[in-house]
């Protein structure tokens, strides 16, 4: 054959660049389901199901459109890894060229390169339309800055695309509507919120679910609530539903979290975009259009576009600039193991219990829960960043390394020493009380830093400030926060340190309740 067109699980764009010059007489598409992709991290059942179901739907659509396709179904072949499966195909078919998009992980890209080299077959990597900007444009942009910051990138991206721009100026006269956004919910919580459009499993998804339940029975998470979009048509319907029902209120409650509220006003479009079912450009243009048509306020449209055109493109560019070095970094020298309750939700800390249980149910938590609940606790506890990375990669349906890794090792765990985030995102239980509604029903009290009722977030927060005082006290962006240490007496500081050790010890022993007690 002429071209072997390798289509990976996050390359499911029906108009992908790998199909533009496809000749069914000489070329063949190739897709493979391999166990290693689900076991290299201990993946949530919903994450595996989503990938495999979306792949099988894509395969069916390719066949219907007349593209010849070799599809290796899980359990029907002997290969453990993509490398083994691909190598065997290359050896048998000897294609003149391999064509693919850029894989979503550095390691998989190395695998493709090595496979092609071993068989002496040229490999051509084509541009993704999962992103508005190419890696090379991002790298070119990055050259002009000593320190990369989201805000600079975001403004550049707005100017380059013209999205929410008028005569080279931001629509509404401001780049940023944070003041209107990020409100705390009232004491009664966020009130009634329209339920997002749900996509009950069809025959293909049900078949995958049965297979996952049998083959990956011990993997975390449940499939009972699986309702993710698995085709481009469903993803488009999810986008329209979000714009019609929830976008207008997205901004104000963007940073809030509340017990039993899974989605709030979030779009839950990340997985569809990351798999290639929905183009990021389609999403941001549709949202801008809704603003221009007077359907949603500028604060919500801008707040949302900042996430996709800003953050999503930014972390993608950063990932490819910084890999593979990023993976190994641990500047805060954090070496605690990840507590067991991250896999079960069995703890008496109400915010962690609720967030993790919902995560296990849906494979989803929204941004602030990832950053300021599960991520924050791991950072304050001092969990080894690579263990945190593996958990986040395993547990969320939208997890692909190019986006998960920068968010975890860079933004959340500060493992890179501030290369990505200008300061560590650390806060005490007081912050959780302000932005969320869990503290009322919790076994711990956010204002207390010592004693049996002390909130472990608060204890560990003050402990973190002490442990990393040298690094952050003189830092212009963190000095103010670290100055708060001066308010505490030496005795208080010593008590906090001791109590933090008790919490760490209890967690290491597998206890996840009554964490302040010496057992
Ligand atoms: P919305 O709140 O509706 O936001 C809209 C879109 O903006 C998202 O769909 C996403 O595409 C984009 N976006 C928002 N924030 C970010 C961000 N920080 N980085 C990149 N894109 C962003 N996102 C993933 O797609 N996969 C991950 O594995 C992932 N892991 C994360 C781990 C941590 C520790 C943190 C703090 C964030 C992570 N994020 C990840 C980013 C963000 O939390 C999710 O994109 C978002 O919660 C997905 O839900 P949503 O589609 O309802 O998002």
Image: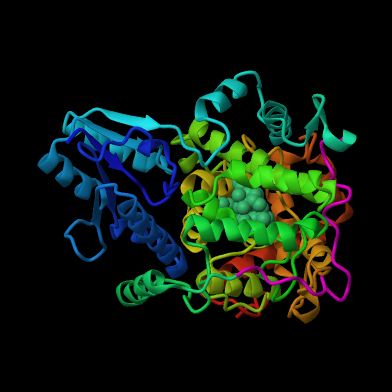
Please identify the quadrant where the N terminus is shown. top left
| Coordinates of residue 479 in the picture (x, y in percent) | 81, 40
Residue 317 lies in quadrant: top right
The part of the image, by quadrant, that contains residue 107 is top left
Question: 362 or 337, which lies in front?
Answer: 362
What residue do we see at 81% from left, 67% from top? Answer: 433
- Residue 497, percent from left and from top: 70, 61
Please check the rendered image and state whether residue 489 is part of the magenta-colored stretch, yes or no: no
Q: Position of residue 394 (x, y in %)?
A: 46, 60
Residues rendered magenta in the picture: 174-197
Residue 284 image-quadrant placement: top right
* Residue at screen point 55% across, 45% down: 279
Q: Compare residues 3 and 362 and report the one nearer the observer.
A: 3
Q: Is residue 175 visible?
A: yes
Task: Pinpoint residue 310: horizontal percent, then vertical percent.
Answer: 67, 39
Q: Main secondary structure of the magenta part?
A: loop
**Residue at 83% across, 57% down:** 252
Q: How many marks?
A: 0
Residue 350 position (above or below residue 20): below
| Residue 412 visible in this rendered orientation of the protein | no
For residue 378, above or below residue 215: above
Q: Given the current orientation, which residue lies at the most extreme left position?
A: 92
Q: Is residue 186 above or below residue 16?
A: below
Residue depicted at x 41% and y 66%: 49
Relative to 103, residue 161 above or below: above
Q: Is residue 379 left or right of residue 292?
A: left
Query: Is 186 in the magenta?
Result: yes
Quarter that holds the C terminus: bottom right
């Amino acid at each position: 054959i002429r071209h072997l067109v390798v289509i990976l699980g996050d390359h499911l764009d029906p108009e992908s660049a790998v199909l533009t010059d496809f000749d069914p007489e000489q070329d063949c598409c190739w897709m493979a389901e391999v166990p290693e992709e689900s076991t290299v991290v201990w993946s949530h059942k919903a994450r595996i199901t989503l990938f495999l179901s979306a792949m099988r739907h894509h395969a069916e659509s390719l066949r219907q459109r007349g593209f010849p396709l070799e599809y290796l179904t899980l359990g029907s072949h002997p290969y453990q890894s993509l490398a083994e499966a691909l190598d065997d195909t290359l050896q048998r078919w000897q294609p003149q060229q391999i064509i693919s998009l850029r894989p979503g992980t550095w390691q998989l890209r190395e695998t493709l390169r090595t496979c092609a080299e071993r068989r002496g077959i040229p490999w051509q990597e084509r541009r993704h339309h999962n992103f508005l900007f190419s890696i090379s444009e991002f790298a070119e942009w990055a050259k002009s800055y000593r320190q990369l910051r989201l805000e600079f990138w975001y403004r550049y991206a707005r100017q380059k695309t013209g999205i929410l721009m008028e005569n080279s100026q931001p629509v509404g006269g401001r780049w940023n509507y944070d003041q209107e956004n990020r409100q705390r919910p009232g004491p009664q919580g966020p009130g009634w919120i329209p339920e997002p459009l749900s996509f009950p499993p069809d025959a293909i998804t049900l078949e995958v679910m049965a297979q996952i339940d049998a083959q990956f029975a011990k993997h975390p998470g449940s499939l009972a609530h699986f309702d993710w979009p698995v085709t481009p048509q469903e993803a488009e319907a999810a986008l329209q539903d979000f714009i019609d029902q929830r976008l207008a209120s997205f901004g104000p409650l963007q940073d809030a979290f509340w017990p039993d509220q899974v989605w709030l006003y979030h779009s839950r479009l990340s997985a569809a975009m990351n798999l290639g079912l929905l183009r990021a450009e389609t999403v941001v243009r549709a949202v801008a259009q809704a603003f221009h048509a007077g359907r949603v306020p500028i604060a919500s449209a801008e707040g949302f576009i900042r996430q996709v055109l800003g953050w999503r493109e930014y972390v993608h560019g950063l990932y490819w600039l910084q890999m593979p070095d990023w993976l190994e970094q641990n500047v805060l020298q954090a070496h605690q193991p990840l507590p067991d309750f991250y896999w079960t939700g069995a703890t008496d800390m109400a915010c962690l219990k609720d967030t993790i249980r919902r995560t296990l149910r849906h494979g989803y938590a929204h941004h602030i829960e990832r950053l300021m609940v599960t991520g924050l606790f791991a950072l304050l506890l001092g969990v080894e960043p690579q263990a945190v990375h593996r958990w986040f990669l395993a547990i969320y349906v939208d997890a692909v390394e190019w986006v998960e890794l920068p968010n975890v090792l860079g933004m959340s765990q500060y493992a890179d020493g501030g290369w990505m985030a200008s300061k560590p995102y650390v806060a005490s239980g007081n912050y959780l009380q302000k932005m969320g509604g869990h503290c009322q029903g919790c076994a711990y009290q956010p204002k207390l830093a010592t004693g049996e009722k002390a909130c472990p977030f608060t204890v560990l927060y003050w402990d973190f400030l002490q442990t990393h005082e040298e690094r952050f006290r003189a830092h212009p962006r963190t000095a103010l926060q670290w100055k708060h240490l001066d308010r505490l007496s030496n005795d208080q500081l010593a008590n906090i340190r001791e109590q933090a050790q008790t919490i760490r010890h209890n967690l290491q022993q597998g206890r996840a309740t009554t964490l302040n007690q010496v057992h």
